[in-house]
Amino acid sequence: MQIAGKNIQRVHFTGIKGVGMAGLAIIAKQMGLDVSGSDVTDEFITDQVLATRGIAWQPGFDPHRVETVDLVVATGAHGGKTNPEAQAAQEQGIPVLMHAEALSLFAQGKKVIAVAGCHGKTTTSALLSWVLTQAGYEPSFLVGTSEITGLGFAAAFGKGEYFVIEADEYMTCPQTDRTPRFLYLDPFISLITNIEHDHPDRYATLAETKLVFKQFINKTPQDGLIVACTDSEPLRSVLAEQRYDAPVATYGSDEEADWQVLDFKSEHGFVSWRIKQQETVSETFCLQVPGLHNALNATGVLRVLEEIGLPPAEASGHLCSFKGLKRRFEFIGERNGVKVYDDYAHHPSEIKATLRAAREWFPGQRIIVVFQAHTYSRTQVLFSEFSQAFTDADQVIIPKIFPSAREKDTLGMTAAHLAQGIQRYHDAVMHIEDVAEIQAWLHENTTAGDILITMGAGDIYHLGTAFLNT
């Protein structure tokens, strides 16, 4: 591997313990590169993952560590190219790339299947990686989660020609590079699940979000394919507002979709559906993760697989063997008859889809959701949508907002304000700021048959584990 004619053998990751950075470090090591890293001493889910793969990291950020490396990869979580290690590398003429730039470099020579969308891209890219692996394609993949059930950590560098990448629309680095991360990719196939207004600290309006998705989709070459879900109105308009070089294939639940989802059914443990293509209706497909949204995600995956030579009938069994991934309606355990699930949902649309799926799987059972809002800016801009997102829950508990490292100003938004907004549409809402107090309430008030769901992009997942273990 080369950058500007310079051979790269030793790569240092500044902030190596983030899920995306750890995944890229694993890929670099599997490519045969020498890998080192640095990070803060806080415990991360990736600590054990890195250790088991023989990737050492050192605490803190020391400029002297980069003196003997060929490339430094930086992350916006630790200052990007303003990090002391990144700055020292630049002063010595050592190349410094942000994670998104390095991912594009490592994917050179592969056919990239980029999975984008404001929601669903993690599950969809994990499902695609799973089926390709089970079908013997030996794909490379990098998915924005810590673990795909059955595959282990959600990153690998395979021998096959395809590289599945979860394509993120958020900015590369809040401090130094506001370029949407997915614009560094060169996709061969683009799979887009939906478009909505999200990341208000980067995109002030839905129109701005649509614009960057147009730029991303437009990178798909003539001999590639654009696969898009027409259930998303903003995505439909993006497809209609301009022409693209690559052919477009659509899927969705309406008759206008090229592949239409029919006969959707949901029972505890699996969902099933069929696909209508022109006048032909397929046999039944099944999936062990809940919700119509995941049947749609799987249909998009099937369309991609057909394009690369794996017909839906041959992919069906692998599809049904997929058991999900970390923090996406993940079953954590059971205590005294109370089943505990955890989900990453942090946008109103995700919340509604997850709770609707939970209601379908657990009809008649009490669903208790502890939702931790993620970032003050998102909570403020989407306040009305958040307030109306919990209708399928029986009890809603709101702890303190998780601010994220990228925000310093609360914007006047608090968890109490959010709870008050939800109370306008829901009878059973409590604001309990302290997580320990929430745990005490759960121990006193839950009964056998209840479903407890911890939800959010912050650290609320610890609550479910604590509930089970105390």
Image: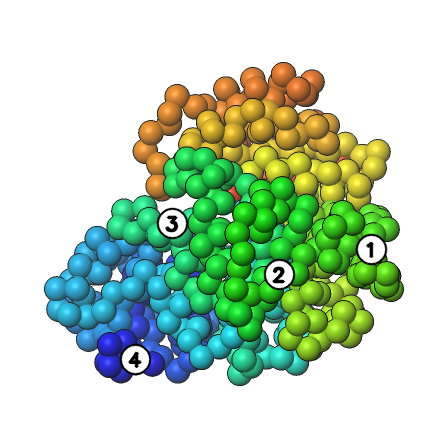
Q: CA distance from mark 4 to mark 2?
A: 34 Å
Question: For the residue marked with disc 3, what is the amino acid?
Answer: Met
Residue 425 or residue 195, whichever sits in front = 195
Which of the two residues, 420 or 442, is positioned nearer the viewer here?
420
Give the residue number, with chain letter if any, for mark 2: 248
Residue 34 seen anywhere in this rendered image of the structure: yes
Q: Secondary structure at mark 4?
A: strand
Q: Quick one: quadrant of the C terminus?
A: top right
Residue 426 as seen in the image, left or right of residue 163: right
- Residue under the point 54% across and 47% down: 241
For marks 2 and 1, give the CA distance. Answer: 23 Å
If you read the primary sequence from the N terminus, does the residue marked by circle 4 or circle 2 appear first? 4
Within-10-Å neighbours for mark 1: few <14, some 14–19, many 20+:
many
Single out the mark in the foreground, 3 or 2: 2
User: Residue at the location (86% across, 63% down)?
Assistant: 280
Location of residue 1 (image quadrant): bottom left
- Name the residue carrying label 1: 273
Residue at 75% in and 73% down: 311
Give the mark, 3 or 4, whose residue is nearer the N terminus.
4
Please provide percent x and percent y for residue 61. Answer: 23, 57
Number of the label disc, if any, that sits on residue 171: 3
**Where does label 4 land, which residue?**
2
